[in-house]
Image (cartoon, helix red, strand yellow):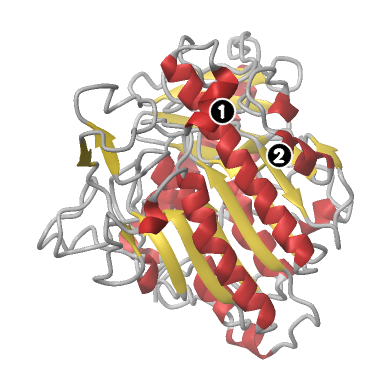
Amino acid sequence: MKRSFLALFISIFCISASAQDAEKVDSESEEKAELPSRPNVVLIMCDDLGWGDVGYNGNEIIQTPHLDEMSRNSLRFNRFYAAAPVCSPTRGSVITGRHPFRYGIYSANKGRMKEEEFTLYEALKTKGYRTGHFGKWHLGTLTTQTKDANRGNPGNIKDYSAPWHHEVDQCFVTESKVPTYDPMYYPTGRGSKRLGWFALKPGEAKQFYGTYYWEGENKPVPIDDPRLKGDNSKVIMDAALPFMEESVEAEKPFLSIIWFHAPHLPVVAGPEHTKLYSQYTEFEANYYGCITALDEQVGRLRKALREWKVEENTMVFFCSDNGPEGNIRDPGSAGPYRGRKRSLYEGGIRVPGMLEWPAKLRSGQTDFPTGTIDYFPTILAAAGFPPDSLRRPMDGIDLNPLFEEKMHERPMPLAFQDEFQGVISDNRYKAYVTKRTGIWELYDLIDDPGETKNLASRMPNLVATMSQAWESWVKNCANSDRGADYK
């Protein structure tokens, strides 16, 4: 390695981030001329979609023709990482470029997006973008007046952080999960409320699932609203497309975040999709079917961008928030990788990832390590922000030099932590620790991507260097979490 991990982390992460110099945006950056053609940005994220759950990664059961086509026209990231092995922390990384332990979203249903964080919505608003968020939110509760979803309760103020607090112009969101078909209801007397069921039949007895869609502060969508019928991925896309079309007509660049619920449990698919998988169990047919339904909505989006004649200069990112739920017997697939959701082994955090941007990118594949943590700096650079315009510790990097074939190795390591595990990895090696034991493992991700051979005893010096760098980074994150980055 040309530079040690410790030197890299000291130089990049451990810069002073005191309240005096942690300004959100360098004032000079706002005065600089904007790029003549700012790209539109669409961020698609699936929920619990495994690396091996798509055709272009080798799945031979689940039909994903639109994603497969998109992959042929995109830059595919073969080593793309969710920032965490569960939902909420990864989502926070997308809109901040920072590790979730810097701002207190340690796990799903814990913490909220702090108002002091400078988000992607707020950044792009300064460049004239319209901003929209559709589908799952999961970065805080959406009400202080109504019982809703996992944490929304009358009087609960500490967890309240909604899109309308973060410069989102238009939203159609849920706090957390909903069924992936007829999202407001579940049947009484059949199916599994946790795993899923075949779609409700006309007139069948049903109950409210408990999670509302929201269009603004104190604006829940009535659960019998016709917009909430049928496939939930379509429900989300039905809300997102008009926002984008209005932006195009107004000649305004847009940020549209589309976070599908599929294939998070409970999985439900409509009859037209479950019949494609009639030879499988009810659980499998619904899991596979809801992914195919989601795939159709990705195709619908790409078709609309072409019809509006904005596909060339629209960045369309696609990824998942973490690996597949359950265990090896469940229908989700982590492909050849070890572990699943909640694990910092590869199967829990290496997820499908690609970017389609015809104006700037040639299609192909890259093994360059990338992740959700890189979205924020990459998009800001594409939108015309000068380098280093954010004066606070960042964990992501600008990938535009990669797109221009000027960057061939990741210049700083990727680091991860959750409540129980830690990881640090470079372009080749990955060190993994369980916090309870403090024992480090080491894997060569080039020769052994399945993490079957622990090299720690053979390479103790490298383990010592990587673990020391990780510990320095953890301390730096804790400093951020105490508020040191905020003015």
Q: Secondary structure at mark 1?
A: loop
Q: Which mark is residue 236?
A: none
Q: Amino acid at mark 1?
A: Gly
Instruction: Tell me the residue at 68%/20% (across/down).
Output: 59
Relative horizontal placement of residue 167, taking residue 383 as reference (left or right): left
Quick one: 373 or 365, which is closer to the camera?
A: 365
Q: Which residue is mark 2?
A: 67
Counting residues from the N terminus, which is met first, the one under dot 2 or under dot 1? 1
Horizontal and vertical percent position of residue 10: 58, 51
Using the rendered image of the protein, determine whether residue 113 is visible from the camera's viewpoint. yes
Relative horizontal placement of residue 257, taking residue 315 as reference (left or right): left
Q: Which residue is mark 1?
A: 50
Question: Badge 1: few (under 14), some or many (20 or more) residues near its Cα, within 10 Å?
Answer: many
Quick one: 201 or 409, which is closer to the camera?
A: 201
Pick out the residue farthest to the front: 203
Q: Which quadrant of the figure contains the N terminus?
A: top right
Q: Secondary structure at mark 2?
A: helix
Instruction: Tell me the residue at 66%/91% (across/down).
Output: 31
Examine the rendered structure and indicate whether residue 82 appears above or below residue 218: above
Question: Badge 2: few (under 14), some or many (20 or more) residues near its Cα, within 10 Å?
Answer: many
Instruction: Tell me the residue at 66%/68% (across/down).
Output: 380
Q: Amino acid at mark 2?
A: Leu
Disc 2/disc 1 C-alpha distance (Å): 14 Å
Pick out the residue farthest to the left: 155
Relative horizontal placement of residue 70, taking residue 47 as reference (left or right): right
Horizontal and vertical percent position of residue 126: 57, 82
Horizontal and vertical percent position of residue 186: 27, 35
